[in-house]
Amino acid sequence: MEKVTINSVAKYAGVSKKTVSRVLNNEPNVSPATREKVEAAFKELDYRPNPIARGLAHNRSFIIGCLYDNPSKSYITRVQSGALEACQKYNYNLLIHPCELRGEELIDNVASLLSTSRLDGIVLTPPFSDQPELVAFLKQKQIPYARVAPVTLDDESISIRSNDTQAAYQITNLLLELGHKRIAFIKGHPDHSVTEARFAGYKQALKEHQIDVDLEIVAEGNFSYHSGEDSARRILNHAKPPSAVFASNDYMAAAVLKVASQLSISVPEQLSIVGFDNAPIARHIWPGLTTIAQPVEEMTYTAVSKLVEKINTSDIDIYYETFPGKLITRESTAALKTK
Amino acid sequence: MEKVTINSVAKYAGVSKKTVSRVLNNEPNVSPATREKVEAAFKELDYRPNPIARGLAHNRSFIIGCLYDNPSKSYITRVQSGALEACQKYNYNLLIHPCELRGEELIDNVASLLSTSRLDGIVLTPPFSDQPELVAFLKQKQIPYARVAPVTLDDESISIRSNDTQAAYQITNLLLELGHKRIAFIKGHPDHSVTEARFAGYKQALKEHQIDVDLEIVAEGNFSYHSGEDSARRILNHAKPPSAVFASNDYMAAAVLKVASQLSISVPEQLSIVGFDNAPIARHIWPGLTTIAQPVEEMTYTAVSKLVEKINTSDIDIYYETFPGKLITRESTAALKTK
DNA sequence: CTGAAAGCGCTTACAG
DNA sequence: CTGAAAGCGCTTACAG
């Protein structure tokens, strides 16, 4: 089987390879008859343009890099799935690049990634979306980038945002409406900007109900199951324990449930628990967790799509869009029993 | 900032670009002095060879594709992590490609992936590792491939195997040694070859203890949490319920735990549960699951490493290696209480 | 040990 | 509307 290149097609169709290239790229200035001939040749020979050759001629790789450092495997998978779908639509490839936010030389790491793999653009997922040095570096290097779920704004990038404060407000309100007045909170990792955003929503809801935040039942977690466990032990053993716990993600909420079981506190009868993210674990434990679902796939899909459009047309400069979260009610929450 | 190419380096070092290329590729026949000069130029100019140009000249992409269709996000993440590490070692890129085993045109899908992305090799993860049509197709197309955790053998490929039968035997034995005699089993997805392998280990252990397999407490799951739930309902409501359940993966085992809670069957006092895989959920639920851990990262790392070596040297034809699983004991298992 | 030439499969100017 | 030439940044033969 011969290798079929643009030359074979040109010969077969009886035109120059430039004309083939024109048809390939949907350029104008090709007579319909010629176009047809060439397209027939494509089919006949089962021609697939060589992306590497295209890349070299264009000085482009047609590769988008995806940066992440996230303890949640399900989150990563969802990010990848959305990014992949967008890449496929535009005939790009996706290069996944897990790396540590606090790694010694994040910038060097990314710089090396860029020059080694010749990425055409890069999509930043939390916590990188709000990493000022990294963002500044990309800006300076003029590498197109898009940010998924950033909290900060930016004057010239693509930002696909969620509204974590609003969602946290909403789920806290759910607890308040169920009659809970003493609601503990477990914060996420301080490096993630959503951590403060979610806390802000919690505080706002309490405030509107004239409840003061009691820092004794606010714990510093870091999104890991383990940190949730530690936090839960502290909170549930408090002299004046809460009747509800809002953990900043579902892993930590699952850990609260574990500690509650160990302490023979029944959920939701004696303790309501809510999480955040609607990770698989939220429905894989019993009772299932009331939580907030965010459209992570769609957000990433949009981010990568806009990024590629920016690369291809340089039309887009700024693009903002906000995707709301959705409250999911399961069995881990119940009305406060009046004594 | 000028683009620095092999030409700039050649000029800077005062040699031909062929010589630069030789140094780059660690070819012999370069005098130490020349080599030093060129290497100094690399450093000085911060030269990074353009992989796309290399690819075109070599007619290679330096990309390895990773095929998967697996419901477990944590498994996928582990596979990716191992594959990525191996790729980085050899300066390859990894292209992830989720796709459906039962998709209408799996072969077309993969064929299109291969010709579009010009993969240099492909790593098959379960359930693709044992998909005969796909394997035959790759063989016929002469695409180098490696298989992770296949059950079947193969006359000319790289196969990185686990020993699921042995591990299942071992964990069943644990239950037997705890005094359990009536042990239910929940099978995995029929498309995954490990499903039968794990079942075989279970049967073997029972046989050695002179216990007959009772198909009434063997359920057909499919690795999903949901299927675990259905299976558990059926099994635990049996007229003569088991004192232990062996689920073929941890998601299903977690579902058994949920159903047990709902039926007020306490674990492990009244029911022991074991899973398989040591997925994160195994330690994120309470009680934690006794299970089998497999070195998925190392397995995939080895598979991809050997694959790349095969591509680069064509020395390797066949490579087999088996990685044993490891029993992890947590709180979901206890000795059977004698009445 | 070193280099000039041709080529990988495409595209970008430039002509006509 | 179409094509011949030169080039993208590297490598593979081939000379010397």
Image: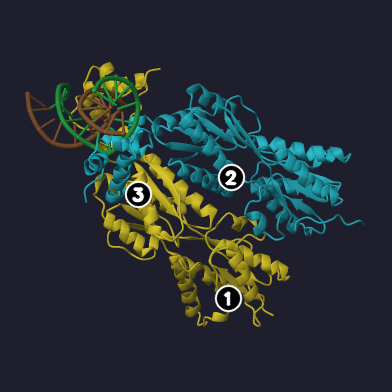
Chain colours: A cyan, B yellow, C green, D brown
Residue A39's mark?
none
- Kind of residue at badge 1: Ile
Among all residues in the image, which is located at the extreme right? Answer: A339
**Which residue corresponds to mark 1?**
B183
* On screen, residue B259 above or below B90: below
Res A104 visible: no
* On screen, residue B257 above or below D3: below
> Badges 2 and 1: C-beta atoms under 8 Å apart?
no
**Which residue corresponds to mark 2?**
A298
Res A154 visible: yes
Q: Secondary structure at mark 2?
A: helix
**Which residue corresponds to mark 3?**
B114
Q: Is residue C2 left or right of residue B258?
A: left
Same chain for mark 3 and mark 2? The answer is: no
Rendered location of residue A195, percent (x, y): 69, 37
Rendered location of residue B281, percent (x, y): 60, 56
- Kind of residue at badge 3: Leu
Q: Secondary structure at mark 1?
A: strand
- Kind of residue at badge 2: Glu
How far, Cα to Cα, is label 2 from label 1? 44 Å
Of B22 and B176, the residue lying toward us:
B22
Q: Chain of mark 1?
A: B
* On screen, residue B261 above or below B70: below
Rendered location of residue A208, percent (x, y): 86, 38
> Badges 3 and 1: C-beta atoms under 8 Å apart?
no
Place residue A170 in its image quadrant: top right
Of the residues tagged 2 and 1, which is closer to the observer? 2
